[in-house]
Image (cartoon, rainbow, N blue to C red):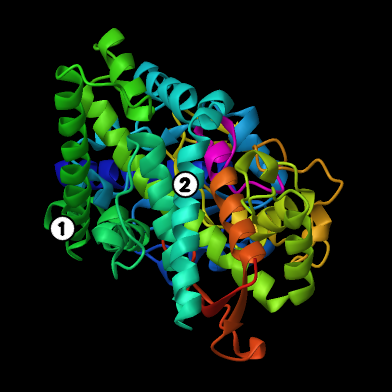
């Protein structure tokens, strides 16, 4: 009799769990049927953004995907993205932290990963005030222009020697020095360096490791084992960055203690801010923020520049149109001023179209629901991972004419920009989690592209028809084959 009762209780309990599971699935968006344990893992290939885009055509703009023990909701249309990033921004602004990221010593103070609480708002305030505010950007404009002058000197030497230039690597070095001058008032690399002073290797490692499929993320029970050694690799790269940035801060503190003249850059401003807000913004916050800025602000800008130059070299008419437009604002000294660059509509159309067709970040960093939320007609539980496939949205023919073609003209005379209000075009995201570095990235990329095009003709090492346009998935979409060409000085 007791055995019968036990069996009945077990059956009833399993039936109860089954009913809960069925109800939960009915409340969630539809999605592909998965296999036991691994879920939809076999449906996701080496380019998840492309796989998810194909699946969404069958299962809808909001789709449920299960990878191992992790359930995600994927948004693939502008309205679905708006529902998450605007209408329910407060509920969907949590973060799912990849296991590899936890190897960053102070990841729990990183503006990229902490929840949108008081600490997060303080860090964002510092960024907005001391880095991305238009007045601050204007104040440090000369420093960034000097970096570009150094790049031009390097290219002139390469032109005289008839040397091939890796345009993406050079753009990375320029973006790196522009960031370091904005933050630290100094260059941190030279353009002859094979590895850009170690920065390129460290950033490349983090882009690959943090963006790679990690079995420990979908089966958290395996995290202590780090089965793919991804956390170990990330720890080495993050540790390198941490040591470098800590050295810069220590040097600056000694400078300030010696009562020497101020630099007036971002680091000085943040140290002042920390002295007035020590409880909310410490030296640790400054160090972690600088690590974030050097990683996020260099790879994306150089990546966009490399893709823009790729498209312009494939389209000589567009190249000539950019050069003609830039020529109209060049001064008698032959120099391109950052302030004047902001007045060039076709150049900005080229940059926007590059960001649309070659998104640096195809899937926005994973959001997380802070509580149960209604998205469309579905109820999504608390702690559900949310992915916004901005790559799919930017290539959807329902919102873009001839979406696979590079057509800068589509942005001319249009209000569509990348500041998060047009949900068919979200290269920097939207809502409170939107990338704060938009104004700086806009200036850095525009000035680099203008300088490459105005001052030099470029000879590819192969025929245009042989250009490899494939990309590699990571935290950013990189060109599978680096863009290399020989410059010839014309201006």
Q: Pointer 2: what residue?
A: 146
Q: Quadrant of the N terminus?
A: top left
The mark lying in front, picked from 2 and 1, is 2
Q: Is residue 488 above or below residue 104?
A: below
Q: Spatial distance from mark 2 to mark 1, Cα to Cα?
A: 38 Å
Q: Position of residue 170 (x, y in %)?
A: 43, 65
Please name the residue shown 32% across and 23% down the image.
268
Query: Is the stretch drawn in magenta largely helix, strand or loop?
Result: loop
Name the outermost residue toward the right: 413
Q: Is residue 482 visible?
A: no
Question: Which callout, 2 or 1, points at the residue further toward the start of the chain?
Answer: 2
Q: Quadrant of the C terminus?
A: bottom right
Q: Is residue 459 above or below residue 351?
A: below
Judging depth in this view, the residue of 382 and 146 nearest the camera is 146
Judging depth in this view, the residue of 172 and 99 nearest the camera is 172
Q: Which residues are magenta?
A: 423-441
Judging depth in this view, the residue of 335 and 94 nearest the camera is 335
Label 1 Cα neighbours within 10 Å, binned few <14 / some 14-19 / many ≥20? some
Judging depth in this view, the residue of 453 and 396 nearest the camera is 453
Please name the residue shown 22% across and 21% down the image.
260
Please name the residue shown 87% across and 46% down the image.
413
Q: Are marks 2 and 1 in contact (CB under 8 Å)?
A: no
Name the outermost residue toward the front: 332
Task: Decide whether residue 251 is among the magenta residues.
Answer: no
Residue 430 located left or right of residue 130: right
Q: Is residue 172 above or below residue 297?
A: below
Q: Position of residue 272 (x, y in %)?
A: 31, 15
């Amino acid at each position: 009799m007791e055995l019968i009762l036990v069996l009945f209780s077990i059956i009833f309990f399993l039936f109860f769990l089954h009913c809960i599971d069925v109800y939960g699935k009915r409340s969630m968006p539809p999605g592909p049927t998965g296999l036991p344990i691994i879920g939809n893992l076999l449906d996701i290939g080496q380019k998840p953004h492309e796989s998810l885009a194909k699946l969404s055509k069958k299962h809808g703009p909001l789709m449920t995907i299960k990878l191992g023990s992790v359930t995600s909701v994927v948004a693939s249309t502008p309205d679905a993205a708006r529902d998450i990033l605007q209408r329910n921004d407060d509920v969907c602004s949590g973060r799912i932290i990849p296991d590899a990221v936890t190897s960053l010593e102070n990841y729990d103070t990183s503006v990229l990963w902490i929840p949108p609480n008081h600490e997060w708002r303080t860090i964002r305030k510092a960024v907005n005030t001391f880095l991305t505010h238009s007045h601050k950007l204007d104040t440090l404009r000369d420093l960034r222009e000097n970096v570009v002058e150094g790049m031009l000197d390097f290219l002139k030497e390469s032109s005289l020697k008839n040397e091939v230039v890796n345009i993406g690597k050079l753009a990375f070095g320029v973006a790196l020095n522009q960031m370091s001058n904005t933050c630290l008032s100094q260059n941190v690399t030279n353009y002859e360096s094979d590895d850009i002073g170690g920065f390129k290797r460290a950033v490349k490692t983090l882009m690959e490791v943090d963006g790679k499929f990690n079995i420990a993320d979908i089966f958290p029970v395996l995290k202590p084992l780090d089965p793919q050694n991804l956390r170990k690799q990330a720890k080495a790269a993050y540790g390198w960055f941490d040591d470098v940035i800590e050295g810069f801060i220590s040097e600056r503190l000694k400078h300030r203690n010696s009562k020497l003249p101020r630099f007036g850059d971002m680091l000085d401003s943040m140290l002042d801010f920390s002295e007035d807000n020590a409880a909310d913004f410490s030296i640790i916050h400054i160090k972690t923020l600088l690590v974030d800025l050097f990683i996020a602000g260099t790879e994306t800008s150089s990546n966009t520049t490399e893709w823009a130059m790729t498209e312009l070299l494939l389209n000589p008419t567009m190249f000539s149109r950019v050069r003609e437009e830039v020529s109209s604002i060049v001064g008698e000294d032959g120099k391109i001023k950052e302030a004047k660059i902001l007045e060039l509509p076709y150049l900005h159309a080229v940059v926007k179209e590059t960001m649309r067709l070659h998104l640096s970040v195809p899937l926005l960093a994973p959001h997380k629901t802070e509580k149960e939320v209604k998205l469309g007609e579905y109820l999504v539980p608390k702690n559900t991972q949310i992915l916004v496939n901005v790559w799919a949205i930017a290539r959807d023919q329902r919102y873009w004419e001839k979406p696979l073609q590079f057509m800068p003209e589509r942005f001319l005379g249009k209000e569509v920009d990348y500041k998060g209000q047009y949900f068919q075009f979200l290269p920097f995201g939207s809502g409170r989690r939107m990338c704060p570095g938009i104004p700086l990235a806009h200036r850095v990329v525009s000035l680099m592209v203008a300088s490459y095009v105005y001052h030099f003709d470029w000879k590819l090492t192969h025929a245009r028809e042989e250009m490899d346009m494939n990309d590699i998935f990571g935290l950013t979409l990189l060109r599978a084959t680096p863009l290399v060409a020989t410059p010839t000085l014309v201006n």
